[in-house]
Image (tube, grey):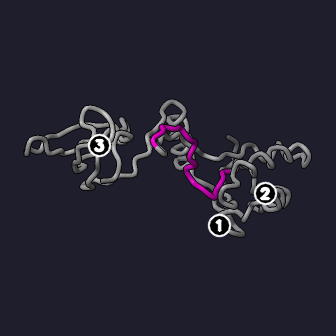
Amino acid sequence: MDDQEQWFVVQTLSGHEMKIKESMEKRLAIAELESSIHDVLVPMERVTEVKLGKKTTINRKFFPGYILVNADLYKDDNQIDDGVWTFVNETNGIIGFVGGEKPVPLSEAEINDILEQLNRGEKDTKPRIDFDIGENVKIRDGAFANFEGRIESIDPDRGKLKLSVSIFGRFTPVEVEYWQIERG
């Protein structure tokens, strides 16, 4: 990464992030700005969730309504490059740079954290867990189907929940996968 090349956060219309990314990438060659705008990124992760009893995997955006643009926005004299500024701001669906008239680029640590999360996300598919500790739930699948219990702990990396289930009048710890339960 050279001295001028930096990552900026750009606000977009929510739900249009991928269209905006594709539009910018197509227009770059026409505008002859490939040397000034290096990358457009919509950070996403793969998430497994259960809807209507079916397990599905979706791509979920880290920052809905925002994209990251790697660009040479500032010239050597610390003035904004009008060509890059105009190109980004005049893209359909763009609201503007975060920071307004003088956007502040992401620090190297911030962008490295985001890129690391993306690399981790390519390898792993995270389960989407919408439950809280202490919540009462019903087990709908597995050896303990139709039992009710209280969530004692959540392990989001493994997609498992530890429940306290009353079996023959005694509370017993049971480990289940997130998709095996429903709200009680």
Quarter of the picture containing the N terminus is top right
Which of marks 2 and 3 precedes in the sequence? Answer: 2
| Region rendered in magenta | 53-68
Which residue is disc 2 drawn over?
88
Mark 1 or mark 2, which is nearer to you? 2
Mark 3 or mark 1, which is nearer to you? 3
**Residue 158 position by quadrant:** top left
- What x and y, as percent, mark residue 31? 90, 49
**Residue 88 position by quadrant:** bottom right
159 or 138, nearer to the observer: 138
Three-letter residue code for mark 1? Gly
CA–CA distance in space, label 3 to label 1 = 47 Å
Mark 3 or mark 2, which is nearer to you? 3
In the figure, is residue 137 to the left or right of 17? left
Q: Is residue 164 magenta?
A: no
Q: Which mark is residue 139?
A: 3
- What x and y, as percent, mark residue 103? 67, 63
Disc 2: CA contacts within 10 A as few (<14), some (14-19) or many (>=20) = many
Q: Residue furthest front?
A: 146
Vertical order, 47 against 130 (above or below): above
Residue at 79 percent of width and 62 percent of height: 89
Which residue is disc 1 drawn over?
99
72 or 47, nearer to the observer: 47
Residue at 81 percent of width and 58 percent of height: 91
Q: Which mark is residue 113?
A: none
In the figure, is residue 141 to the left or right of 98? left
Residue at 22 percent of width and 48 percent of height: 149
Which of marks 1 and 3 precedes in the sequence? Answer: 1
Three-letter residue code for mark 2? Val
